[in-house]
Image (cartoon, rainbow, N blue to C red):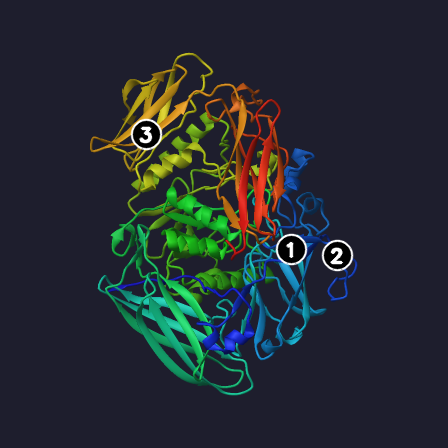
């Protein structure tokens, strides 16, 4: 048998309604109610107040109505003005300044107040009541009914919960008030040192109201031995040993006879095995159950077939079911080796991944679960791995990684410089809580124990070894050529950032996108050529908001394969050709008139054996693949062809059979707008949204990149178009974003967010000289997405 690494996913709290009577009555519900989404119905005030507005009598009618996820500052306020040289100097220096320093005000590091009123039934009086926060940027204080219930100041990326049982009124109304403080902190990581990415503040991740019996499964992040911890001590193709440690607390004033029933269900919901243990737990005490069982002939989890079981943990007080949680289980083993690199389930695999910043336009980090999954899907189509640079990311993103087969290197919340004293203590604690929250994800193959490109930190190393001895720990390696690297103790290196961080690759500039592809694939080819290379992560998947706003346009770093609006650049398709299981062809050219007469060098990305070109129906023959990239599975196809306006088509074949086609048409004069939405239906919870993509098109529906008729910058680079598009919305929705927007490369995005009223919303886009466009999105009652 082979030694396996830690498996499964994060704690799932799956119940959606607070019905305390149903907890006690198993006949009324097949599983006890535990968690309610607490995202709706908040009031919000930006900025501090002379007196804390914590009592129920405080009048917050004038405050803004918001739903969570929510950020303190809208994006249009991030597009900063002022003296570029001054801003650059401030942003690049270590931040060791007072909270009222100019840098803080210019980057909108401020505070915000949130308030919410809710009721609890009388029959909940025998229960425990918690508020659980997936993440608050950056620190938080929580009051319930005017009394301080708890504080959190470890990091803005760390989950926490607060026991509010002593403060609530059962059978009546309750008021919760949260002070979110995103001002610069000398002792809270990743502040106060230099970093290039912004933090926007707010209740930017989900909030839950958790009601449990007095006998309950503990929260996984609260201490070393807590929650449900699942490992696979030994895995082989014919048998897998699964170990489940379940921590149960008896918070009542009497001894409880506790029975734990642990079941493993297959992907169809059929029980594979079930085990029971019974233990008397004293009043106020906690006990950790330890169970091990064998799964015969397991379905193994792998990026190509990410099979997930479910581990269901049920707690009985005598014969009464009182608590239940479910966790996905992925059975696999991974190895790093100095000679062979990385392997999973005994098969070598090159970890071909991308770093992810989670910033979105207009909402910063306040991204609903729907688009956490959207990102995971987009990354998976162009790779098999993600590096969470430079902080723990949303639980729903990691859930999607498990489901999609996306390998993960997860990192603590820090960037480049080490702090001292309390700062380092908090970073180590944040690292521990990250591991406790995420240790059950099969997608996570390693924890990073270094501060970005610095050497391994003893505090992080010790924390990871104590919290999760089943995974190897990635440490910085400066000897790794071509990019910053991570090396495993047993050997095998992961390139953590390539080709470099400071490129300027814009979606409206075709030449820069072609240059990006060639640089990235050249470095990836070199990484694959190293004998002990386990894999590499490109820098970066998405353009992101940066403090270095004078160096990059609009405070956005344009390094990504995909821009911040989630519109792909050409390089994205070159990676899709390496990973998409379906035949694909993409022409990296808009077939617009070239600046100079003569032939045009056409580049095509495809996973087909052969690609041929035709122009206006006439064959131009087969294309040649780049022979200078021998380690790349599907190098780009290239061919120099004469330019003639019309239709350029690429046809891909495998074993002589045509399997994919792609065409581009010379764009004509722009005549109208087109609108498209990622989703035609979203949830009416006041927080869910969908991208609305507006395109400038000609009479044939071809996107027109008006950049080509604009002026160039001082260095000869193309500038984006100045065309404005204005939006209007009616019905059950609202718009988020700059309105009007400036279109870039023929396309731009605005977000359409639901209200709490189900129905539909109609979005209209208008621009001078173009026919307008309309689109309707439905909003429906339901769970969060």
Q: Is residue 706 left or right of residue 588?
A: right
Q: Earlier in the sequence, mark 3 or mark 1?
A: 1
Mark on residue 61? 2
- Closest to the observer, 388 or 166: 166
For mark 3, what is the residue? 661
On screen, residue 428 above or below 487: below
Q: Is residue 129 left or right of residue 380?
A: right
Image coords of residue 593 (percent x, y): 45, 17
For mark 1, what is the residue? 185
Q: Residue furthest left?
A: 655
Image coords of residue 519 (percent x, y): 40, 32
* Residues at circles 1 and 2 in contact by the CB criterion of under 8 Å: no
Q: Is residue 440 visible?
A: yes
On screen, residue 391 above or below 625: below
- Secondary structure under badge 2? loop
Q: Residue furthest top?
A: 597
- Secondary structure under badge 1? loop
Q: Is residue 364 visible?
A: no
Q: Earlier in the sequence, mark 2 or mark 3?
A: 2
Q: Residue furthest front?
A: 759
* Residues at circles 2 and 3 in contact by the CB criterion of under 8 Å: no
**Residue 515 in which image quadrant:** top left
Say which of marks 1 and 2 sits in front: 2
Mark 3 nearby-residue class (10 Å; few <14, some 14–19, many ≥20):
some
Say which of marks 3 and 1 sits in front: 3
Between the residue at mark 3 and the residue at mark 1, the CA separation in whole angstroms equals 54 Å
**Residue 781 in which image quadrant:** bottom right
Task: Identify the residue at horizontal 41%, vertical 34% (top origin).
Answer: 571
Image coords of residue 655 (percent x, y): 20, 33
């Amino acid at each position: 048998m082979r030694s396996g690494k830690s498996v499964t996913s994060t704690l799932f709290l799956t119940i959606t309604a607070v019905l305390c009577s149903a907890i006690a009555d198993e006949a009324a519900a097949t599983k006890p109610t535990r968690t309610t989404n607490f995202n709706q119905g908040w009031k919000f005030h930006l900025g501090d107040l002379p007196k804390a507005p914590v009592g129920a009598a405080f009048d917050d009618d004038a405050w803004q109505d918001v739903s969570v996820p929510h950020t303190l500052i809208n994006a249009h306020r991030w597009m900063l003005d002022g003296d570029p040289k001054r801003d650059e100097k401030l942003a690049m220096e270590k931040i060791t300044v007072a909270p009222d320093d100019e840098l803080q005000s210019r980057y909108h590091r401020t505070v915000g107040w949130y308030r919410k009123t809710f009721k609890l039934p009388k029959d909940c009086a025998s229960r425990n009541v918690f508020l659980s926060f997936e993440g608050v940027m950056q620190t938080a204080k929580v009051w319930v009914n005017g009394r301080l219930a708890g504080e959190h100041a470890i990091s803005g990326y760390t989950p926490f919960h607060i026991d509010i049982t002593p403060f609530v009124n059962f059978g009546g109304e309750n008021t919760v008030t949260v002070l979110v403080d995103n001002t610069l902190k000398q002792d809270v990581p990743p502040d106060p040192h230099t970093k290039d990415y912004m933090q926007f503040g707010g209740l930017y991740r989900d909030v839950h109201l958790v009601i449990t019996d007095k006998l309950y499964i503990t929260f996984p992040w609260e201490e070393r031995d807590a929650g449900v911890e699942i490992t696979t001590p030994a895995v082989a193709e014919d048998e897998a040993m699964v170990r489940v440690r379940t921590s149960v607390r008896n918070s009542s004033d009497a001894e409880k006879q506790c029975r734990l029933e642990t079941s493993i269900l297959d992907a169809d919901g059929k029980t594979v095995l079930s085990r029971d243990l019974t233990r008397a737990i004293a009043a106020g005490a906690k006990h950790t159950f330890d169970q091990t069982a064998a799964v015969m002939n397991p379905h193994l989890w792998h990026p190509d077939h990410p099979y997930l079981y479910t581990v269901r943990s049920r707690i009985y007080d005598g014969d009464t079911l009182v608590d239940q949680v479910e966790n996905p289980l992925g059975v696999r083993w991974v190895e790093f080796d100095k000679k062979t690199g990385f392997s999973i389930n005994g098969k070598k695999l090159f970890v071909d991944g991308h770093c992810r910043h989670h910033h979105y336009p207009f909402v910063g980090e306040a991204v609903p679960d729907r688009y956490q999954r959207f990102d995971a899907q987009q990354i998976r189509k162009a790779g098999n791995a993600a590096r969470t640079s430079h902080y723990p990311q949303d639980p729903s993103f990691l859930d999607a990684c498990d489901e999609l087969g996306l390998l993960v290197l997860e990192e603590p919340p820090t960037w480049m410089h080490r702090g001292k004293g309390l700062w380092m203590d908090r970073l180590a604690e944040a690292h521990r809580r990250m591991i406790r929250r995420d240790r059950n994800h099969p997608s996570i193959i390693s924890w990073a124990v270094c501060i970005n490109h610095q050497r391994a930190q003893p505090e992080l190393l010790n924390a990871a070894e104590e919290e999760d001895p089943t995974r190897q720990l990635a440490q910085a390696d400066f000897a790794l050529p071509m990019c910053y690297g991570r090396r495993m103790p047993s050997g095998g290196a992961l390139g953590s950032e390539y080709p470099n961080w400071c490129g300027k690759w814009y979606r409206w500039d075709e030449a820069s996108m072609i240059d990006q592809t060639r640089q990235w694939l050249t470095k990836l080819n070199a990484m694959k050529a190293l004998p002990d290379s386990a894999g590499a992560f490109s820098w970066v998947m998405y353009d992101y908001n940066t403090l270095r706003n004078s160096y990059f346009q609009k405070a956005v770093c344009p390094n990504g394969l995909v821009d911040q609006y989630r519109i792909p650049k050409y390089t994205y398709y070159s990676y899709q050709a390496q990973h998409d299981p379906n035949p694909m062809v993409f022409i990296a050219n808009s077939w617009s008139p070239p600046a100079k007469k003569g032939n045009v060098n056409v580049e095509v990305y495809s996973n087909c054996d052969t690609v041929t070109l035709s122009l206006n129906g006439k064959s131009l023959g087969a294309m040649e693949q780049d022979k200078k990239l021998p380690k790349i599975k599907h190098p780009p196809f290239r061919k120099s062809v004469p330019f003639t306006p019309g239709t350029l088509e690429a046809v891909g074949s495998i074993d002589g059979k045509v399997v994919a086609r792609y065409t581009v048409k010379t764009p004509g004069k722009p005549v109208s707008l087109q609108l498209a939405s990622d989703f035609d239906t979203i949830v009416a919870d006041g927080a869910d949204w969908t991208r609305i993509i507006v395109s400038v098109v000609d009479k044939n529906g071809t996107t027109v990149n008006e950049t080509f008729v604009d002026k160039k910058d001082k260095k000869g680079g193309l500038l984006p178009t100045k065309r404005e598009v204005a939006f209007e919305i009616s019905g059950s929705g609202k718009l988020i974003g700059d309105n009007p927007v400036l279109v870039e490369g023929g396309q731009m995005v605005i977000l359409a967010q639901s209200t709490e009223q189900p129905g539909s919303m109609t979005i209209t886009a208008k621009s001078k000289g173009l026919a307008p466009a309309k689109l309707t999105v439905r909003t429906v009652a339901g769970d969060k997405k």
